[in-house]
Image: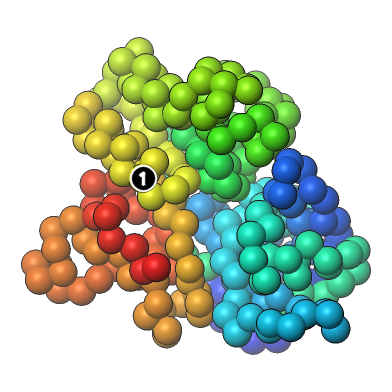
Amino acid sequence: MASKIVPTQSKGIYDCRVLSNDEVARGIFLMRLHAPEIAARVQPGQFVNVKTQPHEADEIIPLLRRPFSVCQVDRTAGWISVLWKNVGPGTRMLSRHSIDTVLNIIGPLGKGFELPQKDAAVALVAGGLGIAPMPILAAALRERRVNFTLLLGARTAAELWGKEELQRFGAPIKIATDDGSAGQRGFVTELLQNWIKENDPHASRVYSCGPMPMLERVAALCVAANVHAEVAVETVMGCGFGICMGCPIEPRAGVELFGRYYLACLDGPVFCADDIRYEFTSH
């Protein structure tokens, strides 16, 4: 039951009913929402902005919406899912939303991933909650009959989600955790470094999402090897469509040469890996 309030050609504001809201890893939740209008149009890498609903016990009422990558989509059944971590007052409110709660959502928003030709060698590289946009991307790649490898990283096995969900696509999966509790001990970028060595750089593409230091390392590895890479940045996006100007990302060419900052919500959240500076974020 999603009722359209203010539709536009590319995005709309909808009341969306919660279908499920389950803890799938330590402190990490997967929320499924009935949102047929968004499900019909969303592309891999795009996001939605969710207005959290306070409860009587909440002392702090967040003013800004929370942006979440669309994780999964079923266009026929009309639902999407978002993955989120319980880290503050806004997300703590989300953890209390049970089935049939109605949330106000804007979407789909932003620029997503550019899908490759089917003869490309593709790696999906996710660190921590950066796994969020990978299931919808993996599904789109499988529809195009593109072969890909999944490289997943997390701090520890307890905070790792996505292996079971992504296994159904039949792609190879390699895992790295900081403490070695799952897969290889170390960083997911070490897995990427090995993957790059094993594939033809001119026919390779990398799609990545995760913390900025990880994305910076992904960009450095891919630029050095002449591999095309796209990164989805994780940052606060208050309005979601460029009005608040609160999500600036500095162009690699510099603001003076480029003429302005990128806005993650409009120019991204997906960027070519060598187009942005990673030491600069909006928060």
Q: Pick whichever, 246 or 173, lies toward us.
A: 246
Q: Pick whichever, 145 or 38, lies toward us.
A: 38
Q: Quarter of the image holding residue 255? A: bottom left
Q: Pick whichever, 278 or 262, lies toward us.
A: 278
Q: Position of residue 12 (x, y in %)?
A: 61, 78
The residue beneath circle 1 is: 213
Q: Position of residue 75 (x, y in %)?
A: 72, 54
Q: Looking at the image, which residue is at 76% across and 56% down? A: 31
Question: What count of labels does the image hold?
Answer: 1
Q: Looking at the image, which residue is at 27% across and 33% down? A: 222
Q: Position of residue 183 (x, y in %)?
A: 58, 19
Secondary structure state at the residue bearing disc 1: helix
Q: Looking at the image, which residue is at 50% across and 39% down? A: 127
Q: Position of residue 82 (x, y in %)?
A: 68, 56
Asked if 194 appears above or below 158 in the picture, the reply is: above
Question: Left or right of 117: which side holds 19?
Answer: right
| Mark 1 nearby-residue class (10 Å; few <14, some 14–19, many ≥20) | few
Question: Left or right of 19: which side holds 194?
Answer: left
The quadrant the N terminus occupies is bottom right
Using the rendered image of the protein, determine whether residue 39 is visible from the camera's viewpoint. Answer: yes
Using the rendered image of the protein, determine whether residue 120 is visible from the camera's viewpoint. Answer: no
Q: Quarter of the image holding residue 107? A: bottom right
Asked if 17 appears above or below 63 in the picture, the reply is: above
Question: Left or right of 23: which side holds 154?
Answer: left
Amino acid type of the residue that numbered disc 1 sits on in the rendered structure: Pro
